[in-house]
Structures are given as C-alpha cells and as structure tokens.
Image: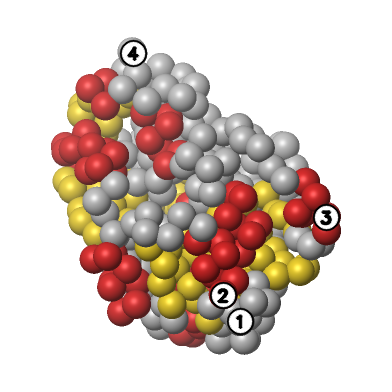
Amino acid sequence: MRLVRLGVPRGLDSLRLIEEDPPEPRPGEVLVRIGASSLNFHDHMVVLGRIPCADDRVPMTDGAGEVVALGDGAEGFAIGDAVVSTFYPGWPTGEPTSAARRDIPGDTLDGYAREYVCMPARAFTKAPAGYTHREAATLTCAGVTAWRGLVVRGRVQPGDTVLVMGTGGVSLFALQFAKAAGARVIATSSSEEKLEKLERLGADAVINYKAVPNWGEKARDLTEGRGVDHVIEVGGPATLAQSIAACRIGGHIALIGVLTGFVGEVSVPALFTNEIRISGVSIGSRADQEDMIRAITANRLKPVIDRSFPLEEIGGAFRYYESRKHFGKICLQL
C-alpha cells in the first residue's frame, strides 16, 4: 500500500510517500480501505512540528473508506460498509476525560494518509447514506466541531441568530447546521467573492471584516441592537473582543480556533456584565458524530468541498491550505 510518513525536520518537505505491506486486522479491529482524507488546522500544526509527534508518523486525523475485513470479535460493521473515522477513538460518549482524548490519529497514533488502516471498530462510525468517501472524510474534525459547538454546547434553537467567521470547514458546517435548525446566520469574510458564496449557501447577512473593523458592533446592529445568540469563534485572540461585542446578554461563544494566535487580552467585565457563556470546544465524541450524521441524513446536507488532491500531492494540498484561498474543505483522494 502507499502511505505518507512525516520525517525530520518537520515541514511540508518532510512528507514522504512510500510503500509498505498492508496491515491485517487483529481481534476487535476492522481493516478499512481509505478512499479520502481531509485537511484541518490540527494536521497542519502536526506537519509543521508545532504539535509534537513521533518520528515517521502517518499524518491526517480524518479518514473515510470501506470496510474490507473484520478481526475476530469486531462488532457493528459488515464488509462493504462505508465508514468515517472518529477524532478521539477512545471517547465513545459523555463528557470528555484526559484518558478518553489521549489517542488521536495523525498525532499520537498513525493517521489516515495511507491506503489501508487497521483500527478498533470504535474508531469509526458509519458514513451518511449516499455520501462519497471524499464527502464523508470532511466530517471527523470540522463537522463534529461545528456540531458540538453549536448544538451540544450551544443548544441552538429556531429563531436564534448565529455568527460564523470566515469560510473554513467548521464555519461552513456551522452555517448549514444553523440553517437546518431554523436559525438566522450572519457570516464574515474579507473577500467580497466569498461573501457572495456565503449568501448563496444560506447566510442571511454578511459582513466584510476588513471594510468594517468593528464587525461585532455591526453584527449587533443587524439584530436591531439585541446581539447574536451564538458565535462560532475560530479566530482566537485577535477576534474574541469583537465576538464578545456581537453577543447578546446571556449569549454563547463556542471557542474553537486559534487562527490568530494563542494568547491575548480579554475584557473580563464585558463577559460577566453581559453574562456571556464561553465554551471551549475540542471536536467531540463518537456519539456526537453519530448524532450529527443522523441530522445530516435527515436534512440532506452536503459538505462544501473546495478542491481535492491525490495522495502524492499532499504537500501541494497543504500549500493550498496555507494560501487561504479555499472556500470549504480541502481533501486528499486515495
């Protein structure tokens, strides 16, 4: 089988395409022929060495494909099932624990930049009916993160207003989930072309955050001064103040990303005076993923995919990711 391993020193030039014998399933494991993977911020940090991992690690946290063999005692799947990986194979349901989130494919374990993988059956769920492997591969990280932030932690309701930031995978999934829940969506971007695409995808109002630096106040104005109910916060330190300004009293911020850095100042009085609730969100459980897939199936949702690359062009896929030109997910097809 073909696979990619991450060499030393870290960086895009350290991604090596090699061949090895395919694995065989042990008791309780499933053998999956991987059809696609998708790129995430987490994968980028691993490849650049900003998240440490073992030498020769196989990267990529997201994988989707077909079950081709079952180990003794492997339950829940049949040969031929279309499946998608879970971000935390050790977190089946409930609240997270350190032990449940210890193992992460593409990080502490070998990931999905390979044609065949053996993992415990709990490391996968069934893919949505009718999804291609490429579509299913977008769900593991971005889809579940948006679902947990907006639905599990946010408890979004019909008539709520949701603010999403940018046009990455998490934000676009959040837009789709919000609309399916009957919520109104305000979306931001610095690109007029992307703002038009956001409107076509269902955004009720859009803001160019470069043209309107105080976009938090603008979002509040778009709610007749009340403020938004939810913010899907993917920027981090440089955007959090505007997210707080956008929120209504008692509003919710799902703190998901650190695209603008890791450390920043926060107006504590603005938080407690307005009783704003901030939820840190780190993907979700296997049960969260299964719930999300049921909602996707019921609402016939499809992910937004910008572009796909073959496995041997994984370096080019990450360079395209770094360009920030994409609208939606970037995938690898195996």
Towards the viewer: 159 or 36: 159
Towards the viewer: 69 or 122: 122
User: Nearer the N terminus, badge 1 or badge 3?
Assistant: 1
Q: Is the C-beta separation of discs 1 and 4 under 8 Å? A: no
Q: Which residue is mark 4?
A: 8
Towards the viewer: 70 or 12: 12
Q: Which residue is mark 2?
A: 221
Residue 36: give x, y in percent of width and height.
Answer: 29, 52
- Mark 2: amino acid: Asp
- Mark 3: amino acid: Phe
How far, Cα to Cα, is label 3 from label 4?
46 Å
- Mark 3: few/some/many CA within 10 Å (<14, 14-19, 20+): few
How far, Cα to Cα, is label 2 from label 4?
50 Å
How far, Cα to Cα, is label 3 from label 2?
21 Å
User: Nearer the N terminus, badge 3 or badge 4?
Assistant: 4
Q: Is the C-beta separation of discs 1 and 2 under 8 Å? A: yes
Which mark's residue is nearer the viewer, 3 or 4?
A: 3
Residue 77: give x, y in percent of width and height.
Answer: 48, 62
Residue 136: give x, y in percent of width and height.
Answer: 37, 63
Residue 291 seen in the figure? no
Q: Which mark is residue 272?
A: 3
Q: Which residue is mark 1?
A: 224
Q: Secondary structure at mark 3?
A: helix
How far, Cα to Cα, is label 1 from label 3?
22 Å
User: Nearer the N terminus, badge 1 or badge 4?
Assistant: 4
Towards the viewer: 314 or 174: 174
- Mark 4: amino acid: Val
- Mark 4: few/some/many CA within 10 Å (<14, 14-19, 20+): few
Q: Secondary structure at mark 1?
A: loop
How far, Cα to Cα, is label 1 from label 4?
54 Å
- Mark 1: amino acid: Glu
